[in-house]
Image (cartoon, helix red, strand yellow):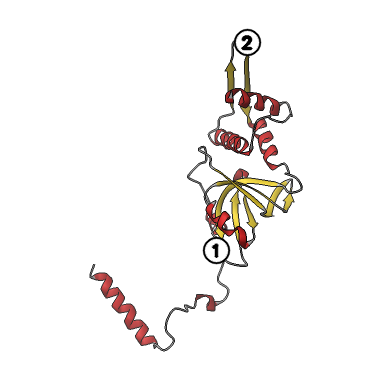
Amino acid sequence: GAVEVLVEGLRAMRGGGEAEGYDLGVLVALRELGELLVEHGIEQMTFGLRMPERRIEVTFDYDLLLRVRESLSRPAGECPALCGRLVMVDLRPGAERCIILADGGREVECTFEQREAETVAKALGHHVVVSGPAKMEHEQVTSMHILDLKMIDLPLAAYWEDLTVDQLTRRRGVRPITDPNELKADFWPEDESADEIAGTIRRWRDEDKAY
């Protein structure tokens, strides 16, 4: 059954082999489980299966978590794969990019073609597996141009994240203003004077006070 496939697959990975019957969804769920254990200071968890003819068990610990991560980062064909949660999308034509929160809280910036914009937008907030030409550093993907994206829903995914201001700033694409003209609004009629603008703002404020 499914439990036997799970246990036997983990045993195979612990021995340095491949887990038969595992797809990307299983590997990503195991990675999330392993990171959850590490986050709560749990060093290991034992999976066991008792059958009439035998009993099998395997211990899931940090070493096995590393093997799961290795399997997920292994190249598929000529392009490496990246797993994580899609946390930011910029759909502006010519500036299409997104950020994927990968292992250990790494934020990986990715680009994509405009024709993929709808697919990427629908995946926002979900766990995904993406692949494409990538820049690597210390055997980790640091940036990627996405050619393929698969969305994976994971019940173990943590909802709350403890992020620094710098991480939130990078995630949302916030940057310093270098040109004051960037703050100029283009929605106000050019033929209205500054006094008319100020009067309109005062009137709006007075209308708000009435509620």
Numbered circle sitting on residue 39: none
Task: Answer with mark 1 or mark 2, whichever residue precedes in sequence.
Answer: 2
Please tell me which residue lies in front, 167 or 100: 100
Give the residue pinned by disc 2: 53
* Amino acid type assigned to the residue bearing label 1 in the image: Val
Residue located at (63% from left, 36% from top)? 27
Task: Please identify the quadrant where the C terminus is shown.
Answer: bottom left
Please tell me which residue lies in front, 155 or 1: 1
Residue located at (72% from left, 53% from top)? 133
Q: Residue furthest top?
A: 53
- Foreground: disc 1 or disc 2: 2
Residue 159, relative to residue 53: is it above or below? below
Q: Is residue 106 visible?
A: no
Image quadrant where residue 34 sits: top right
Question: For the residues marked 1 and 2, what is the alpha-carbon distance in whole angstroms?
Answer: 61 Å
* Amino acid type assigned to the residue bearing label 2 in the image: Glu
How many neighbours does mark 2 have within 10 angstroms: few (below 14), some (14-19), or many (20 or more)? few
Residue 92: percent from left, percent from top: 57, 66
Numbered circle sitting on residue 174: 1
Using residue 4 as the reference point, say whether residue 161 is left or right of it. left
Q: Is residue 192 visible?
A: yes
Q: Secondary structure at mark 2?
A: loop
Residue 173: percent from left, percent from top: 56, 61
Q: How many marks?
A: 2
Q: Secondary structure at mark 1?
A: loop
How many neighbours does mark 1 have within 10 angstroms: few (below 14), some (14-19), or many (20 or more)? few
Please tell me which residue lies in front, 23 or 184: 23
Q: Residue furthest right?
A: 78
Residue 140, relative to residue 145: is it above or below? above
Please tell me which residue lies in front, 166 or 75: 75
Residue 14: percent from left, percent from top: 69, 27
